Amino acid sequence: MAQVRKTTHSRKTGASSTARRKASTTRKRSSRRAAPKRWSQRVTKESNALDLKHGVFKLKDPRKIAGSLKRSAEHSSRRKTGAYRSALSMLTFYINRAGKTLPKTQRTRLERAKVELKRAFGKE
C-alpha cells in the first residue's frame, strides 16, 4: 500500500510571499515622517472629528484640558454630534486607550477634566 503524503503549503507560495513582503516594506518608506505605531495614537493626533492642540492631554491643569477640548469641538465643522459629546468622547477615548499605562496622577487629572468639561458646557 502506497502512503499518501499531505502537504499543507507549497514552497513556491512561501518564497514569493516573502519576496513580496520585503518589496512592499521598501516601497512604503518615503521622505515623510514615520506614521504613529498604534491606530489609537493616530486617532488622537489626526482625528477626523476634532483638530486637537498638540499635547492637550499632557497639560497639568484640568481646566486648560477642558477648555482646549471645548475650543476644538466648537470650531470643528466635521463632527457628527454636538460639541460637548465630541469633546467628552475624545477625552474618554484617550483615557480608555491608555489603559494601565496611564499614570494615576494623569488619570485623575483627566477625570477632573471631564468634570470641568461638563461645567464649561453648562451640563452640571
Image: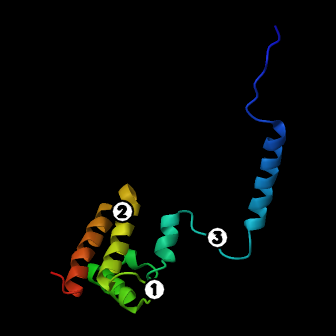
**Residue 19 at x, y percent in the picture:** 82, 51
Above or below: residue 42 compared with residue 23: below
Q: Is residue 48 above or below residue 96?
A: below
Q: Which mark is residue 34?
A: 3
Disc number for residue 96: 2
Q: Which residue is mark 1?
A: 78
Camera-nearest label, 3 or 2:
2
Q: Nearer the viewer, residue 85 or 100?
A: 85
Q: Quadrant of the N terminus?
A: top right
Residue 106 in percent (x, y) is at 32, 67
Q: Is residue 1 left or right of residue 48?
A: right
- Asked whether 71 or 55 is in front, the reply is 71
Q: CA distance from mark 3 to mark 2?
A: 25 Å
Q: Are marks 3 and 2 in contact (CB under 8 Å)?
A: no
Q: Secondary structure at mark 2?
A: helix
Amino acid carrying mark 1 in the image:
Arg
Which residue in the rendered view is the most extreme toward the top? 1
Residue 60 shows up from this direction: no
Is tag 1's residue or tag 3's residue first in the polypeptide sequence? 3
Q: Nearer the viewer, mark 1 or mark 3?
A: 1
